[in-house]
Amino acid sequence: MIKRVLAHIDRGMELFIAVIFLLMVLAGGLQVFNRFVLNQSLSWSEELQIYSHIWLIFLTIPVAYNRGSHIGMMILFDKLNPRAQLILSVITDILWLVLATTILLYTDAIMAVAKNQYSAGLGLRMDRIYFGMMISASYLALITVRKLSSRIAMIIPGDEE
């Protein structure tokens, strides 16, 4: 049951990322059309693309981590025995959890200040722009806890009756 819920969360995040990417492409295409066909520029499209890109980058960090797609130096890791690899993976996961927690804490502090500021082109409150980092860090923490719990279960021998 829990695995299905988590799989739906993973799929939902991937679809959300696809929608943001589509939004970026549409805004960029509309800007090009307006500039070169209608000879007028949109005041909001560049800002929308910039903020969408920020959201896109932060939201894909946990997706890539979940898939094991981040760049890594595997030369030494591959030479370790399986138990040492598992322990090193747990340490790496703990560092990911520290990163997620740090992003959450500092973004919360930034959002407290940014709620009084508005973007120039879209007129959005800036704390809403930073909210993507909160979503990303929360999702990263969720993935990290999932990975940590399964890896720690492999390290600690269970009751074998």
Image: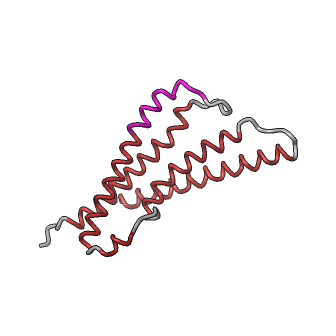
The structure residue drawn at horizontal position 51% and vertical position 38%, both measured from the top left corner, is 130
The structure residue drawn at horizontal position 46% and vertical position 44%, both measured from the top left corner, is 135
What is the residue that sits farthest to the left in this orientation? 161
Q: Nearer the viewer, residue 142 or 45?
A: 45
The quarter holding residue 153 reads: bottom left
- 90 inside magenta stretch: no
The structure residue drawn at horizontal position 77% and vertical position 46%, both measured from the top left corner, is 30
The main secondary structure of the magenta stretch is helix
The quarter holding residue 157 reads: bottom left
The quarter holding residue 15 reads: bottom right
User: Does residue 72 lie above or below 20 as drawn?
Assistant: below
The colour scheme used to paint the residues is secondary structure
Q: Is residue 75 left or right of residue 25?
A: left
Q: In this view, does 85 lie to the left or right of 113?
A: left
Q: Is residue 74 left or right of residue 121?
A: left
Q: Where is residue 48 in the image (x, y as percent from the top left)?
A: 65, 41
Q: Give the range drawn in magenta.
A: 105-118
Image quadrant containing the N terminus: bottom left
User: Does residue 50 lie above or below 95 as drawn?
Assistant: above
The structure residue drawn at horizontal position 47% and vertical position 60%, both measured from the top left corner, is 64
- 110 inside magenta stretch: yes
Image quadrant containing the C terminus: bottom left
Q: Position of residue 97 (x, y in %)?
A: 34, 50
